[in-house]
Amino acid sequence: MTTLLLDASVLLAAFDPEDDHHEPARALLEDEETTLATLNLARYEVANVAVRAWRSPDSVAPLLAAIERLAGDGGVLASTGTLLARAAEVAERHTISVYDAAYAAAANEGGHRLVSCDERNLVLKGLAVLPEMA
Amino acid sequence: MEIGWNLWGTLPHLLPSEPLVYLGILTSMAKVMVSLPDDLLAEVDAEARRGGTTRSAVMREFADAALRKRREGRAAAMRSLLSDISPHGGRAAEQVKATRPGP
């Protein structure tokens, strides 16, 4: 059974009924058959979107609580120096940000499948799958 | 030693790899070495005798049950967290990009 590594966009989509990927993202979080993990970077990214884009600071606590539940499942992986060095290589190779590349490198290192709503930078480059395809 | 029949009805040691049917699913099964305290191993063996099965099968079932319980706990917590959400305009991936620190 492959562990799915979720990036911040999947967590945010699950908490936003207006997102195009809301239903499949939500179904993933509620799936009892699949082990889920994420990267510690997701904590900053979901909090940043909740406060700066959603203007909804009250959403930070449930989003972080969701990440804590992943910590007790497949885990919240740490952005170590080794991981970021690999992420830098992935970023250079695919001309994407080191942030996006960090998720891809973490998934690759752990033998996980990366799930993201980012079609342009991750899915179309073959680095991740959409929630509905996971 | 544990011997199981594979999909082709032959003994697994006759094949280079060991695909087995486990819980109705075709899966590969690795052999691993696990260190256990003596008293825990005694309990595992007692459980195997009670169930008329093998030490390996008991440990597989326990590992499967523990991981399943962990996933079910996470799923239940997520259902609770997602029971009271409000709309935020969508486009999660774009929002993540837009709120990351600039160069």
Image (tube, coloured by chain):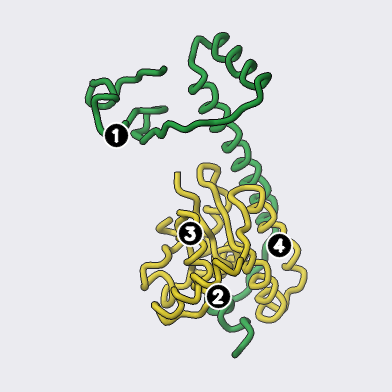
Chain label for disc 3: A
Residue placed under numbered mark 1 in the picture: B17
Q: Residue placed at 67% from the left, 54% from the top?
A: B83
Q: In what element is the residue under mark 1?
A: loop
- Element carrying mark 4: helix
**CA–CA distance in space, label 4 to label 1:** 43 Å
Q: Nearer the viewer, mark 2 or mark 3?
A: 3
Horizontal and vertical percent for residue B2?
40, 18
Would you place residue B33 above or below residue A133 in this image? above
Q: Report how far apart the C-alphas of labels 4 and 3 lie in the structure.
A: 24 Å
Q: Give the left or right position of residue B43, taking residue B8 as reference.
A: right
- Which chain does the green colour mark? B
How far, Cα to Cα, is label 1 from label 3? 25 Å
Chain letter for yellow? A
Q: Amino acid at mark 2?
A: Tyr
Instruction: Give the label, 4 or 3, closer to the camera.
Output: 3
Number of numbered tags placed on the structure image: 4
At horizontal 48% and vertical 69% (from top left) the residue drawn is A117
The amino acid sitting under disc 3 is Glu
The percent position of residue A63, horizontal first and vertical second, equals: 69, 63
Say what amino acid the circle numbered 4 marks: Leu
Tag 2–tag 1 contact (CB < 8 Å): no
Q: Which residue is mark 4?
A: A64
Q: Secondary structure at mark 3?
A: helix
Picture disc at residue A11:
none
* Mark 4 and mark 3 residues within 8 Å of each other at the beta carbon: no
Q: Are marks 4 and 2 on the same chain?
A: yes
Label 2 Cα neighbours within 10 Å, binned few <14 / some 14-19 / many ≥20: some
Q: Nearer the viewer, residue B41 or A10?
A: B41
User: Mark 3 highlights which residue?
Assistant: A109
Mark nearer the viewer, 2 or 1: 1
